[in-house]
């Protein structure tokens, strides 16, 4: 079967590999040049099932309200005339109850755990050079009350397979000696022993090579502008092809793995996907010689700045802005990353050689990604992985491929289904 995958980010590449491994003829199309990895190259690098919390939670409305009046919050929403944002936001607010947050977090956690399992197995089986860090990830808390609340909040992780424990300030410095130089003090941390870090760009490059060995064709610099439909006798539209800057692209099945671009494209076929971009920033800088840089990945839960060590470089990222699709940025967008870098690891970053990136997290209002078939059609969706696309990529690729082949999925597919909003709303028109 010929499958056309739209998007060569981490989700598209892992999906293409999984499909090719199963014997399908696969072509991947992307509007960017071969060396670009879009949002997937702006990640903090965390492979973090232990941080799969749904953003829509009982405390989220208060945080969002605060962001309307302050510019130094890590999550920012600015009031604007944007029907897509309003519609997405109302759905998000509906998910902010305790039971829904629990259900959504569990769906994310299960997929992230399955993904990490497949990811580790693939690295082993294929003898890949890529190696994630081991030793876990640290979620740092500056005050004891917040640390205490984190332990209660994290029960869902521990009760569902994550190996997490609270570490004191002394233990923290033992686990991560680089924090001894920190200008801010921490009450302690949650240490997730199996969370990891790694550079998705490196992994994706290796997966692309594996794909090419299996005959996958990559077509870059090709923008897909619309989905062409043909009506069948059953009145269920089927995709006849994709309209692209290089003419019509034809296959038997189509997978939209275009990150936040998927929603706009799906709309050309009458499929509404509630995916909205959350803009974030990352900075990568060489580590200054002779300084003590962190070995483990982490998140400062106060500033929500996250980091990973990529060899002799440190990647730091932050911020979630709900401001549309613009990918423009300026120096002030990196202010909180620079502040956290200076507070946590003073003198470590060689900022004279830093590189700056922006990315758009494809967010669903409830949190779990959208994986599955648009009803009755040959159009499939694999998007909406939000803040955890790097973490969930291999698991999402497996689920997508099982569904495309009509096979049973390793995890129940319902929490990720394309039509899961259908029952509660008429806003999202389905085929
Ligand atoms: C600051 C930041 C930090 C993050 N940190 C982490 C982290 O630590 N761990 C983690 O797991 N996740 C993290 N994420 C989330 C993760 O980066 C995303 O979930 C993931 O990259 C989404 O991958 P994707 O392949 O769906 O999208 P993308 O990487 O955006 O790829 C989509 C591709 O589709 C192409 N495309 C779109 N529309 C079209 C079109 N019409 N025609 C042709 N091509 C098209 C684009 O050019 C692009 O190459 C972070 C995100 C950000 C922004």
Image: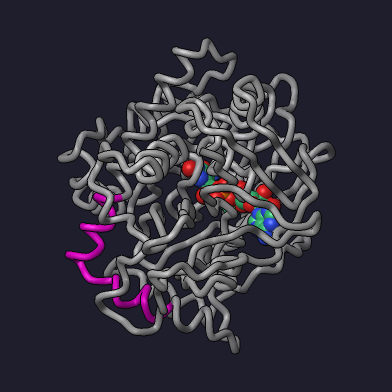
From the viewer's side, name the closer residue of 153 and 170: 153
Point out residue 11 in the picture as x, y percentages from the top left corner: 53, 43
Q: Is residue 322 above or below residue 330?
A: below
Point out residue 142 in the picture as x, y percentages from the top left corner: 40, 49
Point out residue 321 in the picture as x, y percentages from the top left corner: 57, 67
**Residue found farthest to the top:** 127
**Number of disc labels:** 0
The stretch drawn in magenta includes residue 103? yes
Q: Main secondary structure of the magenta part?
A: helix
* Drawn side of residue 106 relative to residue 217, left or right: left
Residue at 78% from the left image edge and 57% from the top image edge: 247
Q: Is residue 177 above or below residue 430?
A: above
* Drawn side of residue 11 relative to residue 395, left or right: right
Picture quarter containing residue 333? Answer: bottom right
> In this picture, which residue range is highlighted in magenta?
89-107
Q: Is residue 221 above or below residue 351?
A: below
Examine the rendering and report whether any part of residue 77 can be seen. yes
On-image quarter of the C terminus:
bottom left
Picture quarter containing residue 403? Answer: top left
* Drawn side of residue 390 relative to residue 39, left or right: left
Residue at 59% from the left image edge and 69% from the top image edge: 264
Residue at 65% from the left image edge and 42% from the top image edge: 28
Residue at 41% from the left image edge and 33% from the top image edge: 137
Q: In the rendered view, how is the structure colored?
A: one colour
Point out residue 304 in the picture as x, y percentages from the top left corner: 49, 53
From the viewer's side, name the closer residue of 340 and 13: 13
The stretch drawn in magenta includes residue 135? no
**Residue found farthest to the front:** 233
């Amino acid at each position: 079967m010929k499958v056309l995958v739209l998007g060569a980010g981490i989700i598209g590449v892992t999906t293409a590999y999984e499909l090719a491994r199963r014997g399908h003829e696969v072509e991947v199309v992307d509007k960017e040049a071969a060396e670009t990895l879009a949002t997937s190259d702006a990640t903090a690098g965390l492979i973090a099932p232990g941080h799969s919390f749904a953003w829509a939670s009982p405390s989220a409305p208060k945080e969002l309200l605060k962001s309307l009046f302050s510019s130094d919050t890590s999550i920012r929403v600015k009031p604007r005339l944007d029907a897509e944002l309003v519609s997405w936001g109302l759905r998000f607010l509906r998910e902010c109850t305790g039971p829904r947050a629990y259900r959504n977090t569990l769906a994310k956690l299960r997929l992230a755990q399955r993904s990490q399992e497949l990811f580790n197995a693939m690295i082993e089986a294929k003898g890949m050079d890529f190696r994630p860090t081991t030793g876990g990830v640290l979620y740092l808390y500056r005050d004891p009350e917040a640390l205490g609340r984190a332990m209660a909040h994290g029960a869902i992780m521990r009760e569902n397979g994550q190996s997490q424990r609270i570490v004191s300030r002394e233990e923290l410095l033992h686990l991560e000696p680089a924090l001894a130089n920190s200008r801010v003090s921490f009450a302690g941390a949650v240490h997730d022993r199996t969370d990891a870090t790694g550079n998705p760009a490196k992994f994706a490059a290796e997966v692309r090579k594996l794909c090419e060995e299996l005959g996958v064709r990559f077509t870059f610099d090709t923008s897909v502008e619309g989905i062409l439909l043909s009506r069948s006798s059953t009145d269920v539209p089927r995709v006849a092809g994709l309209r692209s800057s290089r003419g019509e692209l034809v296959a038997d099945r189509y997978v939209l793995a275009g990150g936040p671009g998927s929603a706009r494209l799906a709309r050309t076929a009458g499929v509404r996907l509630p995916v909205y971009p959350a803009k974030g920033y990352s900075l990568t800088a060489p580590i200054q010689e002779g300084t003590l840089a962190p070995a483990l990945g982490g998140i400062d839960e106060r500033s929500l700045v996250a980091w990973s060590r990529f060899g002799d470089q440190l990647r730091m990222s932050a911020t979630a802005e709900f401001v549309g699709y613009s990918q423009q940025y300026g120096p002030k967008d990196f202010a909180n990353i620079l502040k956290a870098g200076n507070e946590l690891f003073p003198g470590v970053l060689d900022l004279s050689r830093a590189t700056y990136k922006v990315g758009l997290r494809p967010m669903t209002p409830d949190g779990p990604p959208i994986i599955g078939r648009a009803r009755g059609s040959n159009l499939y969706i694999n998007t909406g992985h939000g803040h955890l696309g790097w973490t969930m990529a291999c698991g999402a690729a497996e689920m997508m491929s099982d569904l495309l082949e009509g096979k049973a999925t390793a995890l129940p597919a319902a929490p990720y289904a394309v039509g899961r909003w259908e029952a509660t709303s008429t806003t999202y028109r389905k085929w």
